[in-house]
Image: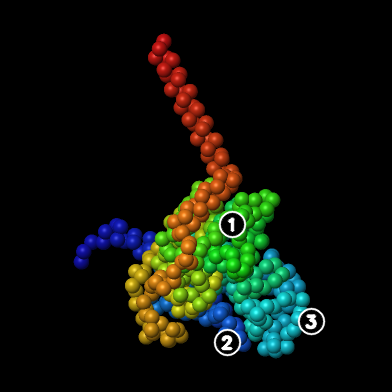
């Protein structure tokens, strides 16, 4: 029998401690019950995608490196922190007889992309519950990273549903985080602009919103112009970067990392909320960008490497198997044990969603070689213009008070050292 080394004996304890610092919030058992696909089969949003992602996480044993939390459902009153009571009351009207709904009997405008369907209120509460649980865990200091792939619904307004989003769990989560943190950085890598979050905090200097998205050509939601930088106290606390169709990992990562590090150095956030919309992936049903899951994951890795407490959320993504693969892969990144991109999914061990991946068992989602940028677009020039936009914007951000205090203290120390050096030189001359 060999002697146990002291470091070997401590290893399980250290692994257990690191495991407890990452929480994976699982609401797939709640959210998958919404029958949006059953009532509107052609609808792009499939809540089932979260269930598929969680099954990959379990089958690849990614959950061995984090703790899985199934949150209790919050009360409807919790949603009133942002949403109006009239809006929530109308959401609650819809049951199995929801097809009787019409515009004359409801004050809420349900559009084609947000139909009134059975299970709507239950789905909305589950979405908010997961994100609020992540925020509470971060506020308590029990975790450094909280992950909720069922969240990230960034289009919903206080009294309006929009863009497949019925409740804005992101705003609710940020409001919870602001109870214990001075500054929150919200980062959005969905293909669409997070107009609901931007609208909620565009006049606040406590929340900085960074969004990389497609803009122009009447593209939904029509907001997020690069010149939109916030209003009032929130002026220059919003940064909108309009990327081009077919952008690849190289340029996207360059823009993202430059913006992220420039903002963090100046703004010094206490916590980061990252919306990981998967519709920026290549081959998405509604997407026009051309990122691989590796490139998308590198954005997540860049945020994690900052060492700042973070809440990672889902978002868009409409090719189910690609979304599930991406979020499972990014779960491995967030736990600190990234899987190799050529990992093969154990399809036979996935009874709920294995059929989705029989024709595509690799974890990686590659770039689409047939997706080319628009003719006449000069990528290098567009990239340069975006970096110049970032460099012009960042100096307008007011540094965090603690940075100003640290700068003042450093200047005082330098002054004392300088005075001491001068005194010594004067003494030597005497």
- Would residue 17 be seen by someone viewing this image from the given angle? no
For mark 1, what is the residue? 226
Say if mark 3 contacts mark 1, CB within 8 Å: no
From the image, state whether disc 3 or disc 1 is nearer to you: 1
Q: Quadrant of residue 133?
A: bottom right
Camera-side residue of 285 and 330? 285
In the current view of this chain or complex, which residue is farthest to the top?
430
* Disc 3/disc 1 C-alpha distance (Å): 38 Å
In percent of width and height, residue 230 lies at 65, 54
Query: Circle 3 — which element?
Result: helix
From the image, state whether disc 1 or disc 2 is nearer to you: 1
In the current view of this chain or complex, which residue is farthest to the right?
104
| Disc with the residue nearer the chain's start (3 vs 1) | 3
The residue drawn where x is 56% and y is 49% is 393
In the current view of this chain or complex, which residue is farthest to the front?
376
For mark 2, what is the residue? 41
Q: Quadrant of residue 421?
A: top left
For mark 3, what is the residue? 104
Image side of residue 2 versus residue 24, left or right: left
Q: Residues within 10 Å of mark 1 (few under 14, many from 20)?
A: some
* Disc 3/disc 2 C-alpha distance (Å): 25 Å
């Amino acid at each position: 029998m060999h002697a146990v080394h002291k470091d070997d004996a401590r290893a399980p304890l250290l692994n257990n401690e690191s495991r407890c610092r990452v929480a994976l919030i699982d609401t797939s058992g709640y959210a998958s019950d919404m029958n949006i696909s059953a009532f509107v089969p052609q609808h792009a949003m499939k809540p089932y995608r979260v269930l598929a992602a969680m099954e990959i996480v379990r089958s690849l044993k990614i959950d061995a490196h984090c703790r899985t939390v199934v949150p209790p459902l919050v009360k409807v009153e919790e949603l009133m922190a942002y949403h109006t009571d009239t809006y929530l009351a109308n959401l609650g009207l819809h049951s199995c007889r929801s097809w009787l709904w019409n515009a004359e009997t409801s004050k809420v405008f349900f559009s084609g992309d947000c139909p009134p369907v059975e299970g709507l209120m239950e789905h909305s509460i589950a979405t908010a519950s997961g994100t609020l649980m992540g925020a509470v865990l971060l506020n308590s200091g029990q975790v450094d990273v909280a992950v909720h792939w069922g969240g990230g619904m960034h289009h919903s307004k206080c009294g309006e549903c929009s863009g497949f989003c019925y409740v804005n769990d992101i705003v609710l989560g940020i409001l919870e985080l602001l109870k214990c943190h001075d500054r929150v950085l919200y980062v959005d890598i969905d293909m669409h602009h997070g107009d609901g979050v931007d609208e909620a905090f565009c006049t606040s200097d406590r929340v900085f919103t960074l969004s990389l998205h497609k803009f122009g050509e009447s593209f939904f939601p029509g907001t997020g112009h690069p010149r939109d930088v916030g209003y009032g106290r929130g002026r220059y606390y919003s940064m909108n970067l309009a990327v081009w169709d077919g952008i690849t990992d190289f340029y996207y990562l360059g823009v993202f990392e430059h913006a992220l590090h420039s903002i963090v150095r100046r703004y010094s956030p206490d916590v980061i909320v990252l919306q990981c919309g998967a519709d920026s992936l290549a081959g998405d049903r509604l997407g026009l960008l051309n990122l691989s899951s590796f490139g998308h994951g590198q954005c997540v890795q860049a945020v994690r490497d900052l060492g700042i407490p973070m809440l990672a959320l889902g978002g868009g993504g409409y090719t189910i198997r690609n979304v599930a693969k991406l979020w499972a892969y990014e779960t491995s990144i967030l736990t600190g044990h990234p899987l190799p991109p050529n990992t093969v999914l154990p399809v036979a061990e996935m009874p709920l969603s294995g059929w989705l991946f029989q024709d595509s068992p690799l974890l990686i989602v590659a770039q689409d070689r047939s997706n080319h940028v628009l003719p006449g677009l000069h990528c290098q020039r567009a990239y340069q213009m975006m970096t110049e936009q970032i460099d012009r914007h960042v100096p307008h951000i007011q540094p965090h008070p603690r940075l100003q205090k640290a700068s003042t203290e450093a200047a005082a120390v330098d002054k004392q050292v300088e005075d001491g050096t001068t005194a010594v030189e004067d003494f030597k001359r005497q």
